[in-house]
Image (cartoon, grey):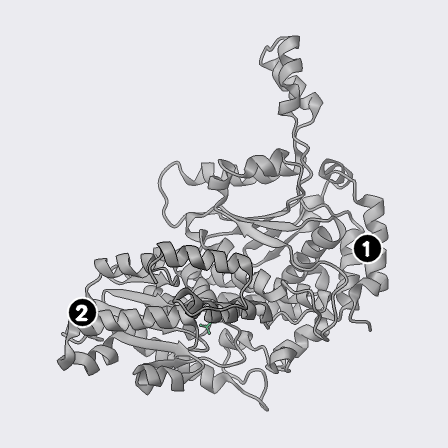
């Protein structure tokens, strides 16, 4: 079996198929297949994924599933769930499914069972979150905790932040959770102004405990808290107001944290797959451990589906294959994530890291260059806001832009007269993108409005919509922890399947190294140490910052 999937017969068959049907319009595809929704939508319980507005014909899916088989997706899936070292460049297993394994037995198996550790941290999270939420956990002056600030970045921020926003309807009424990731003091400083140190708890979330942004923010928070507590309360202030989530407990100890205040994670959890670990502590504090475990159960249900469903009805496999069809065969270079629920506003940012940090690579897992373009550029925004901003380009801008429309059928904040129009807009947009408006239809509408022939001639070109923009619609009955867990795990496994097909190790991220290293070199130059090795542009920019900046 070749690692370069583009040499496989399955890939070649898809190229030929693309020649045959690539230009077919979605209107035509729907006309050819009256039961298209039935054939191309897939359910898992009451979760629904509708792929019928994707530009695929009846023969496309069998050809795509043959591609998945040619890449041995099932074998790689089983190797991941068996705890094999599939993250080869970092020599690690990939075991985030263990974090949402809710069974009582071992995982991945009796020979290597990570569950005792996982369950111990879950128990620690439960005990801690119940004490904080009930007011039993007190600050250095005896006050209950009212505000929790998660200090983390990347996977130590995006997952818990996205989920906390998505599930805000489940929040504890008197406990407010905040997320700070940016080195720019404009995020932490105004927040601190609103907080009372006596009732504020900081979570330092960093797998490595070496991340500059997080450690700087943690140091500033520590200074702020200790200044308020006074030297006489220093030990209590640290013990009552700081906890850490990390795979480097010794480093957290050096920061001044006791063993009891450290929640462990492991090298087999990737940062962007860590929401399910104690990295989700801020979320567990906000919604309670029972709801947090419902999130885990939803993800576990998707894991089970991914392991058991045939490729032809396997949701993450289908999503992955359709993404590959759009990227590698139809030529799309982006994917728009369009959630319609306000609570999902942080989903596009979360998925950007999940997709682009995982599969934004041109080197395969054997260190050879890829011969096809992998992950598209993922971007997005709340759909209803996007309609009044960038949708114009989706409708008439001429680019091929596949999108994922995501919406919950019921709202957690049911204001009369809001949810129906929200759903109508979501469904209308994917239909308008798919089917567009022909010249004949536009003309007929204008005639119906009573416009003159001259007027019609003038406005007609503006009224035509090419359509044929592919979209998947993901429908949740409601946005509760269970369905959110399922949705996130769906994207995780989609990314995994795509990585397998492209031949990528989706679990390393060497591309983030260079910039970090350069930033370390530039700081002394910004502070005045000459560095003749720098390029002309960087030297010029440094000169500007030294003249105008505050370092
Ligand atoms: O720089 C990228 C990255 O390593 C991400 O992969 C990770 O999620 C983030 O930084 C934060 O890392 P840590 O949790 O170790 O602070």
Query: Disc 2 marks which residue?
Result: 198
Left or right of 498, for residue 149: left
State the residue at coordinates (35%, 55%).
169
**Which numbered circle lies on residue 376?**
none
Of the 4 image quadrants, the one containing the C terminus is: bottom left
Left or right of 533, for residue 239: left
Query: Disc 1 marks which residue?
Result: 14
Q: Position of residue 425 (x, y in %)?
A: 51, 37
* Mark 1 neighbour class, 10 Å CA radius: few under 14, some 14 to 19, many 20 or more: many
Q: Nearer the viewer, residue 521 or 135?
A: 521
Residue 304 vertical position relative to residue 547 in the rendered view, above or below:
below
State the residue at coordinates (64%, 55%).
376
* Residue, far bottom: 111
Left or right of 157, for residue 376: right
Q: Quadrant of residue 453?
A: top right
User: Which of the two labelled residues, at mark 1 and mark 2, occupies the earlier sequence position?
Assistant: 1
Residue 339 vertical position relative to residue 143 in the rendered view, above or below:
above
Q: Nearer the viewer, residue 347 or 314?
A: 347
The answer for how far apart the CA atoms under marks 1 and 2 are is 63 Å
Q: Nearer the viewer, residue 25 or 463?
A: 463
Q: Quadrant of residue 192?
A: bottom left
State the residue at coordinates (49%, 60%).
539
Secondary structure state at the residue bearing disc 1: helix
Left or right of 408, for residue 15: right
């Amino acid at each position: 079996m070749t690692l370069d999937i583009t040499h496989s017969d399955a890939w070649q068959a898809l190229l030929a198929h693309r020649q045959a049907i690539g230009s077919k319009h979605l209107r035509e595809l729907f006309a050819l297949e009256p039961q298209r929704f039935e054939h191309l939508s897939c359910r898992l319980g009451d979760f629904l994924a509708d792929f019928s507005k994707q530009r695929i014909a009846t023969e496309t899916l069998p050809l795509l599933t043959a591609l998945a088989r040619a890449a041995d997706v099932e074998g790689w899936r089983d190797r991941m769930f068996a705890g094999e070292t599939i993250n080869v460049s970092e020599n690690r297993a990939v075991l985030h499914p263990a974090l949402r394994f809710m069974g009582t037995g071992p995982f991945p198996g009796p020979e290597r069972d990570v569950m005792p550790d996982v369950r111990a941290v879950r128990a620690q999270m439960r005990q801690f979150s119940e004490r904080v939420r009930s007011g039993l956990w007190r600050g250095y002056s005896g006050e209950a905790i009212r505000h929790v600030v998660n200090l983390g970045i990347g996977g130590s921020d995006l997952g818990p932040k996205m989920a906390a926003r998505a599930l805000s309807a489940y929040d504890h009424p008197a406990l407010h959770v905040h997320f700070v990731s940016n080195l720019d003091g404009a995020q932490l400083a105004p927040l601190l102004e609103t907080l009372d140190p006596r009732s504020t708890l900081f979570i330092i979330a960093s797998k490595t405990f070496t991340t500059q942004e997080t450690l700087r923010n943690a140091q500033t928070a520590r200074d702020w808290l200790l200044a308020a507590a006074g030297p006489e309360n220093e030990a209590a202030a640290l013990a009552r107001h700081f906890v850490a989530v990390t795979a480097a407990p010794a480093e957290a100890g050096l920061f001044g944290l006791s063993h009891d205040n450290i929640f462990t994670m492991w090298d087999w959890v990737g940062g962007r797959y860590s929401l399910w670990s104690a990295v989700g502590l801020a979320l567990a504090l906000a919604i309670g451990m029972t709801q947090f475990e419902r999130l885990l159960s939803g993800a576990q249900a998707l894991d089970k589906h991914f392991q058991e469903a045939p490729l032809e009805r396997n949701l993450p496999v289908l999503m992955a294959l359709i993404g590959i069809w759009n990227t590698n065969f139809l030529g799309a270079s982006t994917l728009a994530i369009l959630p319609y629920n306000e609570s999902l506003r942080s989903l596009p940012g979360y998925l950007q890291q999940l997709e682009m940090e995982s599969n934004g690579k041109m080197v395969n897992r054997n260190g050879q260059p890829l011969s096809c373009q992998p992950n598209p550029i993922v971007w997005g925004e709340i759909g209803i806001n996007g309609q009044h901003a960038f949708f114009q380009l989706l409708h008439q801008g001429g680019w091929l832009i596949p999108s994922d429309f995501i919406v919950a059928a019921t709202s957690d904040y049911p204001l009369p007269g809001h949810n129906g129009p929200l759903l109508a807009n979501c469904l209308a947009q994917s239909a308008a993108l798919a089917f567009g408006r022909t010249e004949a239809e536009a003309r007929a509408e204008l005639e119906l409005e009573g416009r003159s022939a001259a007027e019609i001639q003038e406005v007609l070109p503006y009224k035509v919509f090419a359509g044929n923009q592919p979209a998947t619609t993901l429908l949740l009955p409601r946005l509760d922890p269970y369905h959110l867990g399922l949705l996130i795990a769906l994207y995780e496994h989609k990314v995994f399947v795509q990585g397998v097909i492209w031949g990528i190790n989706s679990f390393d991220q060497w591309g983030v190294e260079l910039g970090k290293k350069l930033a370390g070199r530039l700081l002394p130059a910004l502070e005045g140490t000459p560095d003749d090795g720098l390029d002309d542009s960087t030297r010029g920019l440094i000169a500007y910052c030294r003249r105008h900046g505050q370092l």
